[in-house]
Image (cartoon, rainbow, N blue to C red):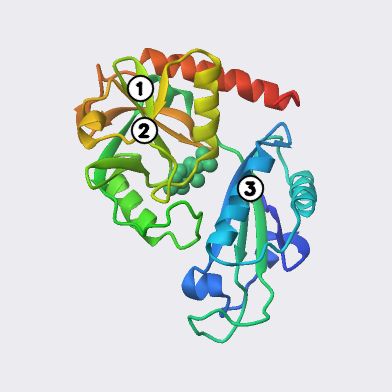
Amino acid sequence: MSEYMPIVYLHDAFMPIDQAHVPVLDRGFIFGDGVYEVIPVYSRRPFRLQEHLQRLQHSLDGIRLQNPHADQEWADLVTQLIARNDGDDQSVYMQITRGVARRDHAFPPGIKPTVFMMSNPMTVPPAELRDTGVSAITAPDNRWLRCDIKATSLLSNVLLRQLAVDAGAVEVILLRDQFLTEGAASNIFVVQNGMLLAPPKNHLMLPGITYDVVIELAVANNILCEVRPIAEHEVRTAQELWQTSSLREVMPITLLDGNPVGDGKPGPLFQKMYALYQDYKQAVRAGKG
Ligand code: PMP
């Protein structure tokens, strides 16, 4: 059986992924000089497309790169990409780099940005993981001070995430000056005294689309929720810890640095939020999201 060959978009055209090539002088390759987005697709409907495009604009502004497309053009490209790929649930990846030029740190004038988009089958974490929860470790947040930009230069995130894998854990919870920022590839929520806590959006974390959904669902369903700086000791003494991201959705963390979180099982607030999130996804599938 031949391997599934996704259709991708590169240099203004759609093609099978094995035919997509970028020149070695692309600044994405040379410097990691680019930004990206990952958009979940449920029943062939992109999830929170407008919010993803807004965050993309914020990232482009952050690296001073002009947006090569208007929102409607992006929406059309995403629709075409979804239609050309297999599966009702997909994960759309889009990346824009500053383009191809002789190697020099400063912005080269007048070059065309490289736009690359691909779609992969969406895989949600297995249900067993939600029943047991996952383990995480902590590490100092040694990334730059513009973590609100979804930049393709992810070297710190890569190294941090590998620390977790080496320790048999799935995520690293990052602490900067004794305060929680986020995970290496997710946002982190804390439950203390029955209250849901989330760190405020600022330059030290990525403004997660799932983070917004979770806070909206909490507010709409009378779950007490506070957005404020969260100290390291509150993370270490949490009743519940959750990670959120487009691909992991809401996932309970039940082991932190080898110690059980709360009673070591996914907590009641998690169970409630997970059910709300699934209902919300169902509504998105039905076109009511
Ligand atoms: N923070 C980081 C560093 C991430 O890589 C991600 C995943 N893209 C998130 C947070 C979660 O963002 P979202 O909910 O938009 O996937």
| Left or right position of 72 against 267 | right
Residue at the spot 37% in from the left edge and 57% down from the top edge: 145
Disc 3 is placed on an element classified as: helix
Looking at the rendered image, the disc whose residue lies closer to the viewer, 1 or 3, is: 3
- Where residue 5 sits in the image (x, y, percent)? 68, 53
Disc 2 is placed on an element classified as: loop
Which quarter of the rendered picture does the C terminus lie within?
top right
| Res 178 quadrant in image | top left
- Pointer 1 and pointer 3: residues touching (CB < 8 Å)? no
At label 3, the amino acid type is Gln
The numbered dot on residue 54 is 3
- Where residue 25 sits in the image (x, y, percent)? 56, 80
Which of 267 and 71 lies nearest the eye of the viewer? 71
Is disc 3 surrounded by few (<14), some (14 to 19) or many (20+) residues within 10 Å? few
Q: Is residue 63 visible?
A: yes
At label 2, the amino acid type is Arg
Residue at the spot 67% in from the left edge and 79% down from the top edge: 111
| Left or right position of 232 against 114 | left
The numbered dot on residue 25 is none
Residue at the spot 46% in from the left edge and 47% down from the top edge: 206
Which residue does the numbered mark 1 point to in the structure image? 132
Looking at the rendered image, the disc whose residue lies closer to the viewer, 2 or 1, is: 2
Looking at the rendered image, the disc whose residue lies closer to the viewer, 3 or 2, is: 2
Alpha carbon separation for disc pair 3 and 2: 23 Å
| Left or right position of 42 against 139 | right
| Res 285 quadrant in image | top right
Which residue does the numbered mark 2 point to in the structure image? 228
At label 1, the amino acid type is Thr
